[in-house]
Image (cartoon, rainbow, N blue to C red):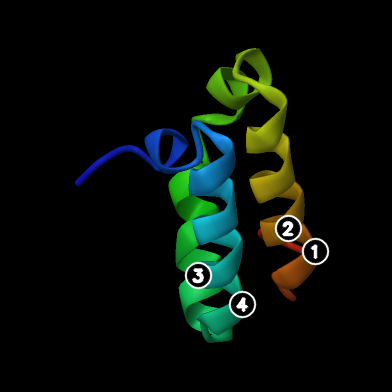
Amino acid sequence: MAKVTEWVGDEEGVRLFIELVNLCDPKSKKLLLRAFKGSIAEIVTLNNPTYVAVIKLLTEVDDTVLV
């Protein structure tokens, strides 16, 4: 399985990721957020579109403890 940061490495990937998040149920959103764990340092060094994916996911997840 590809790393999550590879999915959102460009603008098209971010668009697809946002659509995926829009279609996911709450449990799947939490799984996606857990997949980002450990990659935040890498995301910080990547291009700006990646931040959009992280912000979208953080605003959609309803588990404040996990966030």
Indicate whether 2 appears above or below 46: below
Which numbered dot is residue 42? none
Quadrant in the picture for residue 46: top right
In what element is the residue under mark 2? helix
Specify the quadrant of the image occupied by residue 5: top left
Marks 3/4 in contact by CB < 8 Å: the verdict is yes
Q: CA distance from mark 1 to mark 4?
A: 11 Å
Mark 3 Cα within 10 Å, few/some/many (few <14, many 20+)? some
| Residue 41: x %, y % from top left | 60, 20
| Label placed on residue 59 | 1
**Residue under the image location 67 percent in, 35 percent down:** 49
To which residue does mark 4 refer? 22
Which residue does the image show at 57% across and 48% down from the upper left? Answer: 14
> 10 Å neighbourhood of mark 2: few (<14), some, or many (≥20)?
some
Report whether 15 appears left or right of 51. left
User: In this orientation, which residue lies closer to the viewer: 10 or 22?
Assistant: 10
